[in-house]
Image (cartoon, rainbow, N blue to C red):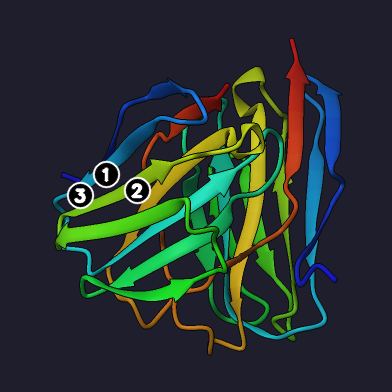
Amino acid sequence: DTEVTQTPKHLVMGMTNKKSLKCEQHMGHRAMYWYKQKAKKPPELMFVYSYEKLSINESVPSRFSPECPNSSLLNLHLHALQPEDSALYLCASSQNPSLAEELFFGSGTQLSVL
Amino acid sequence: TQLLEQSPQFLSIQEGENLTVYCNSSSVFSSLQWYRQEPGEGPVLLVTVVTGGEVKKLKRLTFQFGDARKDSSLHITAAQPGDTGLYLCAGEPGGTSYGKLTFGQGTILTVHP
């Protein structure tokens, strides 16, 4: 299994809603990532989890709250988002947290904030 | 300042043409990766180049890593409509950022039938 699975694929939410994005991998990878991507732009790193511990937070607003319940799962909790947060949210994993080696990306969640 | 300068940003060509995408930096990279992303999907790794001067071929795609490990190129021969997508180079400058990949701005390639 070389897949990173993200759900939901699409999400529309209001600015007062609370929602969660989910990500799962069963490759035994020890690093997991959240990226935000605007249309026709490169992915922007948000968070890195290394061995289930948050190792990098790229100064992301607190309305985004990551969680890593176990080595296979990664969640991103969303609360009080703004319309400018609308984007494709990508989850990725890699084998070795110490090296930015090959990233396996999920298909992403296309988020629209109304 | 972008650590990885990718060019061109947009490329629109006819089927059968050749093209080259460039990825340049003033920093040394321990390795560089090339990804391809289709609309509505996540990026997929095409290749990783590690050794200065290295050339890797993947069917009609040829990847080169500069001798000084500061630049890379992707050459596509006889492009096909299926090659259409966003091409991204990425790397970890100096190999010391511990999991923090830097991406180039991307090249949006459109191949017309």
The residue carrying pointer 2 sits among few (fewer than 14), some (14 to 19) or many (20 or more) residues within 10 Å by Cα, namely: many
x, y percentage for residue A55?
Answer: 37, 78
Q: Chain of mark 3?
A: A
Do tag 2 and tag 1 residues touch (Cβ < 8 Å)?
yes
Residue receiving disc 2: A76
Amino acid type of disc 3? Gln
Q: Chain of mark 2?
A: A
x, y percentage for residue A18?
Answer: 36, 35
Do tag 3 and tag 1 residues touch (Cβ < 8 Å)?
yes
x, y percentage for residue B78?
Answer: 72, 30
In three-dimensional space, the C-alpha distance between marks 2 and 1, rounded to whole angstroms, equals 9 Å
In three-dimensional space, the C-alpha distance between marks 3 and 1, rounded to whole angstroms, equals 7 Å
Judging from the image, what secondary structure is the residue with disc 3 in? strand
Nearer the viewer's eye, disc 3 or disc 2? 2
Nearer the viewer's eye, disc 3 or disc 1? 1
Amino acid type of disc 2? Leu
Do tag 3 and tag 2 residues touch (Cβ < 8 Å)?
no
Using the image, determine if residue A70 lies above or below residue A63: below
In three-dimensional space, the C-alpha distance between marks 3 and 2, rounded to whole angstroms, equals 15 Å
- The front one of B84 and B60 is B84
Q: Residue at x 39, y 59 (%)?
A: A33
Judging from the image, what secondary structure is the residue with disc 2 in? strand
Using the image, determine if residue B74 lies above or below residue A109: below
Amino acid type of disc 1? Cys
Residue receiving disc 3: A25
Q: Chain of mark 1?
A: A
- The front one of A3 and A7 is A7
Judging from the image, what secondary structure is the residue with disc 1 in? strand
Q: Residue at x 37, y 83 (%)?
A: A98
The numbered disc on residue A23 is 1
Q: Residue at x 80, y 36 (%)?
A: B18
